[in-house]
Amino acid sequence: MKKQIGSIITDFFCIYLRNEAGLSENTLKSYRDTFILYIKYLEERSVCTPRNMDLSVFTANLVSMFLDWLESERHSSVSTRNQRLAALKTFSNYVIRKAPENCKGCQDILHLRVKRAPSAMVEYIPIDIVASILNQPDYATLQGIRDLAILSFMYETGCRVQELIDTCLGDISFRKPNTVKLTGKGRKTRIIPISSNVADIIRQYVERYKINQPDQQLFTNRSQKPLSRSGVAYILKKHLQLAKQVDSTIYIKSIHPHVFRHSKAMHLLESGVNLIYIRDFLGHSSVTTTEIYAKCNPELKRKYIIEAGEQLENSILPYSDNEKDELLEWLKNNI
């Protein structure tokens, strides 16, 4: 079995996760990091070395201690702990399929429960601060029109950072209605409408940067290489700081790209857009994920409670004399 585990792990990453499961590069990296950390833990605890590791080290007891080690010694969050467990559960399922004679330990791992974490508050910013940030790039310059196109694209589409990085010119349709095709987690695609204003900004950017091939990446850095996640974060933080210099009342200390996505979702919800449509807009697999936006806004909670109360009041009307007589008659005959 020592010889077999190498091929099982290789097939798991190179064939199953990449081709069958269709996971994104970022998810693959997360799974890879899980295995690196697990092997590191096994070495530190003198359980085994990478050279003599076999499937016997995949047990519920060892995995439980590994998860505790992540929290206590590496100070990982509960969310990260649960992500590592999810990766090991996926591998356990794969082993059960490919090497069923060694499935006992893997079956026990599948019964491990995720750790409940306190509900995290969704970070979002008011629409006027979004507008202030978008007003900062100097679109008369090459760098300014690029930054404006990136920020406008991010907010208008509510995209994930990786979706922005992966977008090519051919994914944009400049015919009315203007749309963009985004490729999200699990390589799922969705079509998002964009306003004529944002489409014009992107069109100007494309013309000035001479981007003319459908497979050409839409957004690049100064070296004409694909943007990195940190590069996108830098652009956003830079223009937040510029906005704060113009308006001292802006209270946001720091910001990251996903805040723009959260903000777009909140603004849609505040405008009365149904959660189902917001789910599809964001590319969530379940509306349960989207419901976090409804839960985190006190004003929306108050609004929905009042609306629900009004509907209840309207449905409870006093009985007429005739309805009372019919109800009494029914009670006499049936009780």
Image (cartoon, rainbow, N blue to C red):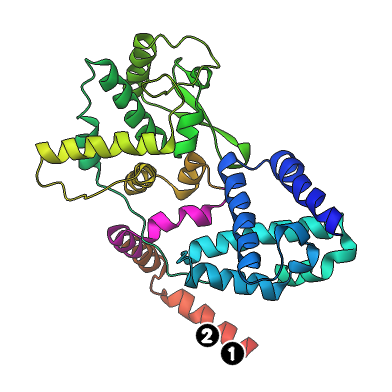
* 295 falls in the magenta region: yes
Q: Are marks 2 and 1 in contact (CB under 8 Å)?
A: yes
Residue ID for mark 1: 332
Using the rendered view, name the quadrant where residue 104 is placed.
bottom right
* Magenta part, dominant SS: helix
Tag 1: amino acid: Lys
Residue 159: tell me if it is visible.
no
What SS does tag 1 mark? helix
Give the residue displayed 52% in from the left and 22% down from the top. 171
What SS does tag 2 mark? helix
Q: Which circle marks residue 288 in the picture?
A: none
186 lies left or right of 136: right
242 lies left or right of 165: left
Q: Nearer the viewer, residue 191 or 42?
A: 42
Instruction: Tell me the crowding category of disc 2: few under 14, some 14 to 19, or many 20 or more residues within 10 angstroms, Cα based.
Output: few
Residue 215, image x, y percentages: 55, 17
| Quarter of the image that includes the N terminus | bottom right
Give the residue displayed 74% in from the left and 67% down from the top. 57
Q: Which residues are magenta?
A: 285-305
* Position of 246 relative to 139 (above/below): below
Residue ID for mark 2: 328
Tag 2: amino acid: Leu
Give the residue displayed 63% in from the left and 73% down from the top. 64
* Position of 47 relative to 201 (above/below): below
* Position of 315 relative to 188 (above/below): below
Residue 211, image x, y percentages: 44, 12
Instruction: Tell me the crowding category of disc 1: few under 14, some 14 to 19, or many 20 or more residues within 10 angstroms, Cα based.
Output: few
Residue 54: tell me if it is visible.
yes
* 89 falls in the magenta region: no
